[in-house]
Image (cartoon, helix red, strand yellow):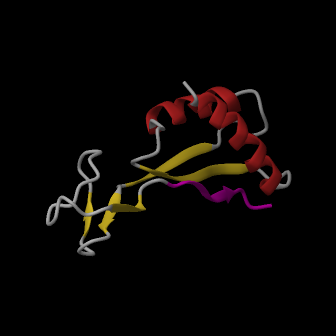
Amino acid sequence: MHELSICNSMVGIVQQYAEGRTVRAVNVRIGAMRQIVPETLIYCWSLVTETSELMGAELLVERIPARIRCSACGQEQVLDKPVLKCDSCPDGRMDLVEGDEFLITSLELAEV
């Protein structure tokens, strides 16, 4: 369960950018090809923040589907399963366009 380790790292990053202000929510984007289970990440977030200054801060996850582009024909498609194959020309080399990201996109802070 590497989500616990990820959450521990996230706590440090969030605290750094919050600069002592109360954090209400942390928004993250997770690509479908990332080996992170959003529900597990949310659960681990609640564990690692329950005894910190981030207690009560909600983790809001935006899931990004995997999108690929064929180098041969240029067709783009959203993957419904983790198979990097072009529907138009199966011999084409595929590039992952979107779906590998893991980003903290924003913090929702309490008003001072």
Seen as rendered, the residue at the extreme right is 20
Magenta run includes residue 77: no
Residue at horizontal 41 percent and vertical 47 percent from the top:
33
Compared across the picture, whether 27 is left or right of 97 comes to right
Image x and y of residue 102, in percent: 55, 51
Q: Is residue 76 above or below residue 80?
A: below
Identify the residue at image location x=49%, y=48%: 61
- Please tell me which residue is depicted at 53% across the width and 36% down the height of the picture: 42
Q: Is residue 104 magenta?
A: yes
Q: From the image, which quarter does the C terminus lie in?
A: bottom right
Q: Magenta residues?
A: 101-112
Quarter residue 82 falls in: top left
89, 106: nearer the viewer: 89
Q: Furthest residue to the left?
A: 88
Residue placed furthest toward the front: 91
Residue 59's spot in the image, x, y percent? 56, 44
Q: Residue at x 72, y 39 (%)?
A: 9
The main secondary structure of the magenta stretch is: strand
Q: Residue 71 vs residue 49: left or right? A: left
Tally of numbered tags: 0
User: Does residue 106 sit above or below 30 in this rendering?
Assistant: below
Residue 12, image x and y in percent?
A: 78, 43
Question: Position of 59 compared to 85: left or right?
Answer: right
As rendered, which of 52 and 83 lies closer to the eye?
83
Rendered-image quadrant of the N terminus: top right
Task: Give the image quarter of residue 98.
Answer: bottom left
Find residue 58 and report its horizontal and vertical position in percent.
58, 43
| Left/right of residue 99 with respect to residue 94 in the rendered view | right
